[in-house]
Amino acid sequence: MNPSYNLLKKLTQAYGPSGNEEQIRTIIKEEIKDYVDEIKADTMGNLIAIKHGTGKKIMIASHMDEIGVIITGIDDNGFLRFANMGGVSSFTSLYQRVQFANGVVGIIGMEHIEDMKNLKLEKMYIDIGATTKEDAQKKVSLGDVGSFLGDYHDLGDFITSKALDDRIGCFIAIEAIKKIKQTPHELYFVFTVQEELGLRGSKTAAFGIDPNLGISLDVTSTGDTPKAKHMAIKLGEGPAIKIKDNSLLVHPTVKNLMIHTAKENNIPYQLEILEFGGTDSGAIHLTKSGVPSGVISIPCRYVHSPSETIHKKDIENAISLLSKILQNKNI
Ligand code: CO
Ligand code: ZN
């Protein structure tokens, strides 16, 4: 099976910072509407696609949003001040380009700073090529949200782009939707909003769906670059079955189901213990009286930068693993 990487490219390059997921929702809806029994957007903006079945109610979550910046001020010389939308680092943002919903592009610069340790977002600005406040106001407004630019490149085995967190999760879900012709279970594929702001879309979606099982698809860090912080995850060694992160301890039945399915089908996998961060299953598992939840993670270098980097084999194996799990009658 060869996934259509053109679709992944299209998904990553579309504009979708938290709270501004419309473009992503439209692309996904068009792509999957003929493969599901029901499809709808909820109040928060989550896209919910259902494949009917009689077994367990399973919620599969991938977040549509990406990190970004929000305009907090415009000065007399037309420079913008901004704050983060999600986990934006001052160091990875410096001299990057951001793009607003209307297509306006800006460059992130900094005030003169003696010691780079003091580089903070409040000492930085966005230059949109305006020279006066009025000039800038013709292009942007307070509260406008920008996303980072970062072209998609196929490096052979690797792919690099902005927003692979978490368009890769969306892509894997889409490919599984197309692949699964028949399911013993009631599958709720949820393309969530505002994950980067604190798992917000998945929280309300899970409450509404009230699933028997939750599975999220998201990226995780690796420890496979020169003198990296220790982490037992490598690019290309298989999708990672999460054991814990800061939002979740994976329910043992879900962890075992994933490991068992991988082994049974000869799908390579790794075990993930992430010492920071969280993902949608963090919200799903605390719904109502609790939902057994787990995560299939895609190993990713340079997370939350415009050059997020993943391995094609991990993508293809994640699609297989997810599809096999969802077609397992014995869940
Ligand atoms: Co993220
Ligand atoms: Zn993510």
Image: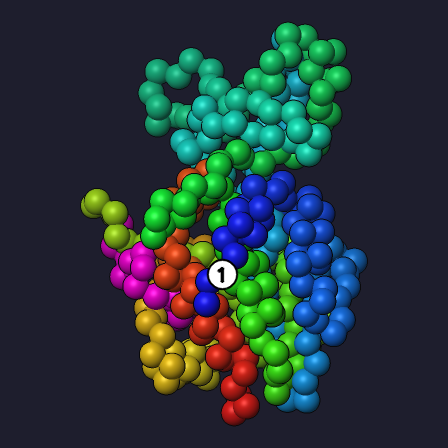
322 or 292, which is in the foreground? 322
Instruction: Give the dominant element type of the magenta stretch: helix, strand or loop.
Output: loop
Q: Residue at x 68, y 76 (%)?
A: 51
Is residue 322 something that shows in the picture?
yes
The residue that disc 1 covers is 3
> In the rendering, at what x and y percent does residue 70 appear?
63, 33
Colour pattern of the rendering:
rainbow
In the depicted structure, whether residue 43 falls above or below residue 271: above
Residue 270 inside the magenta-drawn segment: no
253 or 23, which is in the foreground? 23
Magenta span covers which residues?
A: 229-244
* Quarter assignment of residue 317: bottom left
Residue 238 inside the magenta-drawn segment: yes
Mark 1 secondary-structure assignment: loop
| Horizontal arrangement in the rendering, residue 279 relative to residue 228 (left or right) | right
* Quarter assignment of residue 132: top right
In the depicted structure, whether residue 321 falls above or below residue 163: below
> In the rendering, at what x and y percent does residue 18 appear?
63, 46
| Horizontal arrangement in the rendering, residue 137 relative to residue 80 (left or right) | right
Q: Residue at x 60, y 30 (%)?
A: 99
In the depicted structure, whether residue 18 falls above or below residue 232: above
Residue at the outermost left position? 227
Q: Amino acid at mark 1?
A: Pro
Residue at the outermost bottom position? 330
| Horizontal arrangement in the rendering, residue 103 relative to residue 109 (left or right) | right
Q: Residue at x 49, y 61 (%)?
A: 3
Is residue 245 something that shows in the picture?
no
